[in-house]
Image (spheres, helix red, strand yellow):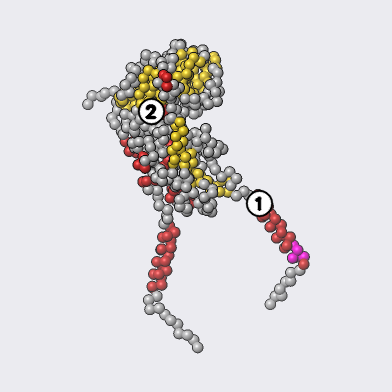
Amino acid sequence: MSERKKLDRRDFMRGAAAAAFAGATWFAAGSKAEDTVWQLDPNKCTQCGRCSTHCTLNPSAVKCLNQFNICGYCDLCFGYLHPGSRERDTDAENLLCPTAAIERKFIEAPYYEYKIHEERCIGCAKCVEACLVFGNGSFYLQVRQDICVNCNECSIAKACPSEAFSRVPASKPYLYITGDTPPNVVR
Amino acid sequence: MKEPVRRLKRPWLVYVCVAAIAVVYFGLLAKNRHPEPGANLRYDVSDYRQVDTVETRFVETGRIKLAVEDARAMTVLAAGGLMVGGKNVVALYDEGGREVSRFSIKGTPTSITQAPGGEVLIALRDHVATFDLHGTMKKTWDSLGERAYLTSMAADEENVYVADAGNRVVYRFDRSGRLLNRIGEADPARDIRGLVVPSPYFDVALDGEGMLWVVNPGELGLENYRPNGDLITSWYKPSMKLEGFCGCCNPSHIAFTPAGSLVTCEKGLVRVKIYDVTSGEFQELVAGSELFPKEQAVRDLAVDTRGRILVLDPRHDAVRIFEVKEKTDG
């Protein structure tokens, strides 16, 4: 039976130094790596509707935003009204949004402001597609970081047919449709 | 003392149970727990695309393939041929569609037109520059301001009309570039409601008699003005049907045929149609969603001296040519 080798003081010091160096390196590297969050690129989004059905949260953490500085403030807004609507009013049968999450507010004749109530929005992208097809494309989807639980593997990203989802730095968590301009800038 | 070994009466049951558990486990793993979005969560305009699948006398007879990056504007030249403007370049094509020359410019033209006498006017977002046919710049007019976004021009012997989508107005200049008056601003005293321009699609054109027609895109119709800005007549056709203009702001482009008919083009559901300009009565379809299935907007529309309808289609980087198909016996 072989005799167990005793750990002498020199070996202990060597091991401790190595462990301290490795720990310091890991800590230094870790503190420099910025946290990331999930976000979707509105220019890649194809409005498939899966953001509303594939998020682990219900309703989805993906919400519609209106980029006011490119919104046309149209009276006949196709993001707000159903294409076959008879009247341009707030009656349910005329609304495109399945949860009535868009509020229409008169500004001046004949312009209206369209505001998204995010607590009602389910991220289905119907209004996004309609505005893109018929209007200026001012509606677009974004992952709301105050709602998103930042899953390690985002189930929407996995299902997204256009690979619009990616991890972005937490310090710049939104990808605005017109570069860095935030969506709450009213012209 | 050695325990007796207990044997199962039906040992295969264990294998069956293990297999069943494995099937359920892997089945659940493979199954997508998320449902696909249903009909209520999908935006479907296919029904509205169906309305323009009607018989038409027109067929697409050719395409002029463009070697111009980001082609945005075109005009038919009086001597025949076509001028197309894109990023930092203007190219000239003969009637057969062959590029004959090109010249460089700074910027991307938002509109091109040729005035009587041959002078070429090019709108560059906030100002107009004049050129000769060889591309020599003659004059740059003053900027119309930071908000200006010039989308269309029309010129006669005395006037140049310039549509500005940013300021929602049509400017009337003399041929030297001096601003004479503004057209289309709200003025209750003159019974003018004002132009509604929600997007950078705002077109003007002169008919065969030299009358100015201005698209009021937000009202989905056309307005006819005198040079001094008096409104003569107007008609509006908001409708998803073929006879009307759909979307928030249409028609996106207009032009006149040599016979005086109005040709319109819409964005959203791209439809090229012909109207009687005085009554606003729909006459016929030139091309509909079948020929423009994925386009959201074309860039420009023109009619050449032979009556061919030319559509600048960015998806195909081409000018698409539509003509009345010839009747064949049998």
Determine whether the residue tagged by mark 1 lies in a helix, strand or loop. helix
Label 1 lies in what chain? A
Q: Residue at 37% of width from left, 14% of height from top?
A: B209
Q: Quick check: B289 above or below A27? A: above
Q: Quick check: A181 above or below B221? A: below
Residue stretch rendered in magenta on the structure? A10-14
Residue that extends furthest to the front in the rendered view of this protein: B189
Residue A145 in the image: x percent, y percent?
54, 48
Observer-nearest of B12 and A62 = A62
Q: Residue at 45% of width from left, 82% of height from top?
A: B5
Tell me the residue that label 1 is attached to.
A31
Q: What number of labels is visible?
A: 2
Confirm whether circles 1 and 2 share one chain.
Answer: no
Residue that extends furthest to the left in the rendered view of this protein: B330
Q: Amino acid at mark 2?
A: Leu
Residue A52 in the image: x percent, y percent?
44, 48
Q: Marks 1 and 2: CB-CB under 8 Å?
A: no
Dot 1 crowding, Cα within 10 Å, few <14, some 14–19, many 20+:
few
Give how far apart the Cα atoms at labels 1 and 2 are. 58 Å
Q: Does the image show residue B94?
A: no
Residue that extends furthest to the right in the rendered view of this protein: A10
Determine whether the residue tagged by mark 2 lies in a helix, strand or loop. loop
Residue B104 in the image: x percent, y percent?
54, 21
Q: Residue at 40% of width from left, 66% of height from top?
A: B20
Q: Does the image show residue B36?
A: yes
Which image quadrant is residue B261 in?
top left
Dot 2 crowding, Cα within 10 Å, few <14, some 14–19, many 20+:
many
Q: Quadrant of the N terminus of chain A?
A: bottom right
Observer-nearest of B249 and B84 = B249
Which label sits on residue B220? 2
